[in-house]
Structure formats: C-alpha cells, structure tokens
Amino acid sequence: MSPQYARRSVAALSVLAAAIAAEASETVGASINAKGVTEIFGNHFGMPGVNATYDYVVVGGGTAGNTIAARLALDPANYSVALIEAGTFYEILSSNRTQVPGYNFEAANPTNVGTLSSMTAVQIDTEPIAGYNGRKIGYVQGMTFGGASAANYGGYMRSTVGAHDRWAKAVKDDFWSWDNVFPFYKKSCNFSAPDYTKIDPKLNISYDPAAYDAAGGPLHVSYGNYVAPSMVGIGEAMERQGLEHIPGFDSGRLLGYGSLLAAIDPRTATRSSSETSFLQAGAKSAGLRIYPNAMAKRIVFDSDKKATGVVVKGNSKTTNVEWTISAKKEVIVSAGVWRSPQLLMVSGVGPSATLSQHGIDVIADLPGVGQNQWDQPFQSHIFKVKVETNSQIVAHNPKVLADVTNQYLTNQSGPLSSIGATQAAGYENIPASMRQRVLSNDTQALMDSYPSDWPDINFLGLESSAVPADIGPDEYYLLYTDMFAEKIADAILKGE
Ligand SMILES: Cc1cc2nc3c(=O)[nH]c(=O)nc-3n(C[C@H](O)[C@H](O)[C@H](O)COP(=O)(O)OP(=O)(O)OC[C@H]3O[C@@H](n4cnc5c(N)ncnc54)[C@H](O)[C@@H]3O)c2cc1C
C-alpha cells in the first residue's frame, strides 16, 4: 500500500468514525466522547457489590426514573445520582422486538412475555376478576432501562386541560394546572412533521404546530415513516360515528378523532424510549452512575425514619451479590405501578395490618399504599379486511418479511417504521341517555365527578396484532380496540 493511499484511508476512516459517532450519539454504548471514550459503557456504570454513596438514589430506570435521574444529573457540580435498574439494555437483549417500531405487537403482547420474543418484560397475573368472568388477567411490565417505554405501543398523547386542573386542585398545587405544565410537555419532546416523501401525501395528517417547540427536548415524537392505508377507513368510521376531527391530541383536548403521534425517531425509524432520550442525555454528565441488573430489595431508614439508602441485589447469575447504595439527600422510588408499592411495603411503608401479617416491621402505617389500583380495560374486535395490514408480518410470512425488512433497512420506511396506528385514534364520552341505561347510579356519579373533557372511551385502529393460525398468504385482518377510561373500569371489573 502506498503511503499516500494509507494516509487517504486513515483520513477516510476518521471521517467514517466521526460519522458513526455522530450517527450513534443516541445508540446505547456507541456514543463516543471527544477523547474517544465510549459513553455509558465503561465510565457510567456503578461497581456491583461495592457500597457507595450518592446525593440521590433513583430506584427503577423506567419511563419516570430515567427522566428524573437524567434531569438531576445535568447539574453534576451539585448532585451525584445513582440509577438502579432490575433489567439491562433492551437493545442488547431483544433489539428487533423493541427498537423496530413495527414489531411493537411482539414486545407489548402478553402472550409473548417470558418467551424469546420479549426478554425485556415480565408478566404479573391478577387474582380472578368478576367483570372478566372470573378470569385472571396478565399485566405486562417492562424490565429494562426504558421500562415500559421500551416495551409499550409507543403512542404519544397528552392529558386534558380539565384533568390537569382537577389534579392541581386535588394536590392543592397550582403548578399542575394545564397552563403551567404545557411548557414542560413542549420542553420534553422533539416533534417531526410527517415526511411525505415516505408517507402517502394523500393521508394529509393534521397537527397543531403550537403544541411543540422548535428547541424541544430529547424524546423524539413523529408519525414514523409509514401510515397504513387501513387507517383512512378507520378515520372515516369515526367521522361517521359523529366524532369531530381534531389536529392531534397534544393541545389539552382529547375528545374527537385524529392522528396519533408515536415515540419514534424518524431519522433512524427506531423507538425513542426514556433510555434513548433522557438517559442518554443524562449520561453525558459526570454525575450519573447506573446499576444494571440491580434489584432494590428494600429501602433503608435511619432512627428518624428518614430513607438513607437502598439494599440492592445483583439480578443476574454473574452479579449474585448484595450491597448498599446510600443517599445523602433522597431515595426516589420510580419502580412502576406494581413494584413501587411492593418496595415500599417490604420496607415497612404501607397498611400496618398487611405488613404485620408478613412479619415486616412498620416504619409508617400508610393504608393507601398498594391499594386502589385502577385500570383501562380494553376490548378488541378483529375484522377481515381488503386493504393490506401488517397481518402477514404478524404471521411471519417470509416473503413479506423480506420485503418490509428491505424497505426498512434501505429507506427507514414501510410498515416496520411505524406503530401501525398513527392515522386513527379517537376519544368519546358515552351519551348521557346510554349511561343511564347501562351503568349503575354509583358509576354514573363517579363519572360525573370527572371533568367533562376527560373521555370515557378511547378508540384505536391498530394494525392486527392477532391473526388466525390458518391465515392465507393474501389475507389481512385489522384490530379495532375500545379502551375504557379508568373511571368506568371499576364498574366493568366488578361486573356491574
Ligand atoms: C403493553 C403496554 C403498552 C402501553 N402502551 C402505551 C402507549 O402506547 N402510550 C403510552 O403513553 N403509554 C403506554 N403504556 C403505559 C406506559 O408505558 C406506562 O404508563 C409508563 O411506562 C410507566 O412508567 P413508570 O416509570 O411509572 O414505570 P416503568 O416504565 O414500568 O418503569 C419501572 C422500572 O422499574 C424497574 N424496577 C421495578 N422494580 C425494581 C426494583 N425492585 N429494583 C430496581 N428496578 C426495579 C423496572 O424494571 C422498570 O424498568 C403501555 C404500557 C404497557 C405495559
């Protein structure tokens, strides 16, 4: 090789390395800093098995935990932060199923939990439920950096003006009113308008530009790079049902129908989770240490009942040790709807009768902990349709899979680049006359106590996530889902 050619190759390689570093700045383990050191992997891990002290200890690296830890870590001069997560990086364990938006049906489907299709989530079964004919229901919980934001459907929408104002009243803190929180919604995400070089322009997605800021934040929200033709029909059905067309669901209003955003980075057509967004941003700070495969076993309290740390156990065969991570300022519990109350209760915070029954010393008798879980039950209808849906992908048709994979890899477009529901979501209130006919007085009174802009039902047109075992190679199915708001869930679950 001539010296000149070698020099050109080295120059080309360093340009390539710089390009990879720039491209990869949001890819776990591949973000390379100015000194050539890989971010997150290497210098951002805490040492398993070694006691350590930080200002803040955050338990649970899910949707909330990553965001909180990353925000605190942005001030490394003042705060050191430990983030403890029972799982590890979903990109390593199950990348297709989690990173590629079009496979979300595999990641989020309870029937796949615990199988090779979803190694980043766990399933929790309920006791038999009256309203479900005595059946047990399996709930999915993400167990990975990103939490459920790495295993969910990825739909992005915001709450309503009335719901925020009710919340502010309930907690007697006007900070939570819609007007005060709206700027923070805008600050957290980075909006991309539909790319009509990849999405059919005929679909004409409408959105409210005032709902987003140009500066934005780390979470990518977009329409993916594909809108399924079936969604047009679903939109028309909602129009005929009498729902008003609205420009998306991010401006404080939900009642109506329109296009749903998704947590997808359209440049790479990959899932934008709290890990790829907030955690990666926080990892640029020297103040953050992350503990993967680390299960918080209990919170440690001092004699004044102040939380001073967490006992942690390695959650893999290779880190089967126990150690303590102490907090100079606060322990923040963000282990999700199931595990946060569980951790509090095993640590002595909860209803004293239940704690005593299990031989747990009571630190604080708080009867509400671990009680009153509300839900959003949904029912799905599957229709055979004449337009192409992702049924053949769900059915693992090899030719279709090869085609869509090729489209995804060459152009970051096609069905795999989207969550398959972007064009058609709707929210409605049950008409008063029907409420009186089908709901008990108690349920109606409960519903009346909610703000009038808080919907009863959410309609979702989804590309199919269930197909018959004997599906033919040219057959397509569509899933249409009604999701009931938590205010009527109670009645459904009790079988009223
Ligand atoms: C199947 C499914 C689909 C969904 N679809 C959507 C959607 O399309 N749009 C939407 O907005 N929302 C959706 N959601 C809801 C949304 O994902 C959740 O509301 C949100 O992720 C909850 O965030 P969290 O931080 O409270 O908990 P999580 O994100 O669940 O995070 C909790 C984290 O704590 C960790 N953890 C638990 N216990 C411990 C412990 N003892 N020690 C250490 N770590 C621990 C877990 O591993 C997990 O990573 C969906 C949820 C599911 C399950």
Image (cartoon, rainbow, N blue to C red):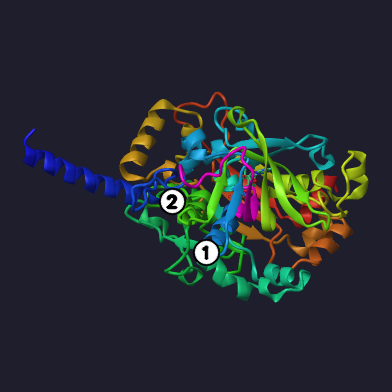
Query: Which residue is located at x 55 percent, y 35 percent?
Result: 106
Give the percent coordinates (x, y) of residue 75. 53, 64
Identity of the residue drawn at 74% across and 37% down? 137
- Residue 326 visible in the current orientation: yes
Q: Was residue 137 drawn as part of the magenta stretch in this picture?
A: no
Q: Nearer the viewer, residue 146 or 4?
A: 4
The disc label shown at residue 224, or none? 2
Q: For the residue marked with disc 2, what is the amino acid? A: Gly
Residue pictured at 58% horizontal, 45% vertical: 152
Q: In this view, does 167 lie to the left or right of 427?
A: right
Check whether the beta carbons of the residues at disc 1 and disc 2 lie within 8 A of each other. no
- Mark 1 residue element: loop
Tag 1: amino acid: Ala
The quadrant where residue 495 appears: top right
Would residue 495 appear left or right of 39 to someone viewing this image? right
Q: Name above or below for residue 268 compared with residue 219.
A: above
Neighbour tally class for label 1: few under 14, some 14-19, many 20 plus, Cα within 10 Å: few
